[in-house]
Amino acid sequence: MTGTIDIDGQSIPFEDGQTIIEAATAAGVYIPHLCHRPGYTPHGSCKLCTVKVNGRNCSACTFPATDGQTVINNSDELEQDRRRITQMLFVEGNHMCPSCEKSGNCQLQGVAYHLNMLDNHYPHFYPRREMDASHPDILIDHNRCIFCNLCVRASKEKDGKNVFGIAGRGINKRLIVNSPSGQLKDSNMSIEDCAAHICPTGAILIKRTGYQVPIGQRIYDQKHISEVALAQENAHGQD
Amino acid sequence: MAKIKVATTSLAGCFGCHMSFLDLDERLVTLAEVAEFDRSPITDIEHCGPCDIGLIEGGVCNSENVHVLREFRKNCKILVAVGACAINGGLPAMRNHIALEDCLLEAYRDGIGVENAQIPSDPELPLLLDKVRPIHEVVKVDYFLPGCPPSADVFWSFLTALLEGRQPALPYELVHYD
C-alpha cells in the first residue's frame, strides 16, 4: 500500500511498510529523535519523535504511515513536550558538556540546541555511575548513557555479537556488558564494531581520538541537527 | 531616566563568566551609559541593594552561597543564571559522586603534598553542602544564559533585549553548553 500522509499541512508520500518518521525523512521533514536510526529495528523509547496522529500522541519512529493520516509535528505543545523530555534526559544522568569529549558532536546536545533548551528545569539526580575504561580502544562512561538501546541493537543486528544489554527498570535501569566480569575488556567487542560508533551521546567513546577537532568547530557548532540528520539519514537510504 | 541597576556575583564558579562579560569590551561603555553596577566584583560593593538585574555565576556549594543567592533573589527584579555551573552545577558538581568526607580527607589530609594535615574547622568558614546544586534548585530563576562561559555576544543579546523592553531570546548560534 502506498499513499500520502499530511504532516503540518504538507502532503507526503509513503511506501508500504514505512513508518511516519521514514516517510518524513525521505520528504525532507525533520522530526526530532535520539533512539531512532535508519536500518535499525525501531525502539520507540526516547519519545522525542512524539507527533500527533489524527489527534493522538504517537512515536513517529514506530507508527506505520497509513493513507490519509493527519500528523502534527511542529506545534508549541509538542515543542514544549520535547524540551521537557530532553531536560529529563539531562537531569537523570550526569551530562557535563564542558568536560565531555563528545560536546559539539553529541546528538543529545544537538537536539537540545534545536529545541532552544536553555536550562534543565528539573532538580538534578546526580546519580552515581561508573566508568569502564578496561577495553584497550573503547571507553564507556555510564554517566552519559540515555538508554536509547542503539549500541544493544548495533551489536546484535549489525555486528552479529551480543555485547550490550539494558538491565533493571526505572531508576535502576543500566547498560550492562555481556562478559564474565561485566567489563568491556572481557567481551568480544572491537573498535571496528558498529556498536562502538553508534552512541548518540558521549557514553561510548573511542580512545586516543579525543579533541582532534577543537570545541567550537564541531558538527552542531556549525549546523542544526535537523539539517545534519536529514542529510545523513537520506544518504543511508541510498546505500 | 534613572540608570538600570545591575548586580553580579560568582558563587561556586571560576569567574570565567565574569571574564567573558568583560569581553564586551567597548560595548561596556555603551552599557555604562544606561546601566550602573551595584554589588559586583567590578565595584567591590559588599551587599546588594534593590536592583533591576542580578547575574549569578556558579552553582551553590556552601552555606554562604545560599545566603548570597537569597540576597540577590530578594533584591533583584530579574535574576539570571549565567553559565553551566549556575544552570547544572557544572564542573564543581563533579564532586557530587564523592562523599563530602572523602573530598575533605583527600584535599586536606591524604592528598599528595599536604603539610600540616587538618580539615579546616574555623567557625568563620562557610559549611560545605553535601552536593553542589544549580541555583534554580534554591531560588526562582527568571532567565538562563548557557555556556562555559556564555560568550560576550550572549550577554549583549540578552541585556540589549531587556533594556529595549523586548523578551530576550537566544538564536541557535548563541546557544552552547561548552
Image: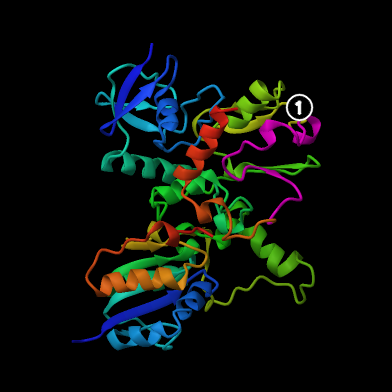
Q: Is residue A177 left or right of residue A201?
A: right
Q: How is the image coloured?
A: rainbow
- Which residues fall within the magenta stretch? A183-211
Residue A107 left/right relative to A75: right
Q: Position of residue A54 (x, y in %)?
A: 25, 23
* Residue B55: image location, x then y, percent: 38, 72
Dot 1: what SS? Answer: loop
Name the kind of residue labelled 1 in the image: Ser
Towards the viewer: A216 or B103: A216
Residue B19 image offset from top left, x and y in percent: 51, 78
- According to the picture, the residue beneath numbered tag 1 turns out to be A179
Q: Is residue A193 above or below residue B57?
A: above
**Which residue is drawn at the image coordinates 41% and 37% (left, top)?**
A30
Compare residues B4 and A196 and report the one nearer the observer. Answer: A196
Name the residue at the left extreme.
B1
The image quadrant of residue B94 is bottom right
Left or right position of B27 against A216: left
Picture residue at 56% right of the left edge, 47% below the top: A106
- Check the residue under mark 1 and report the chain it is in: A
Regarding residue B71, the answer to whether it shows in the image is: no
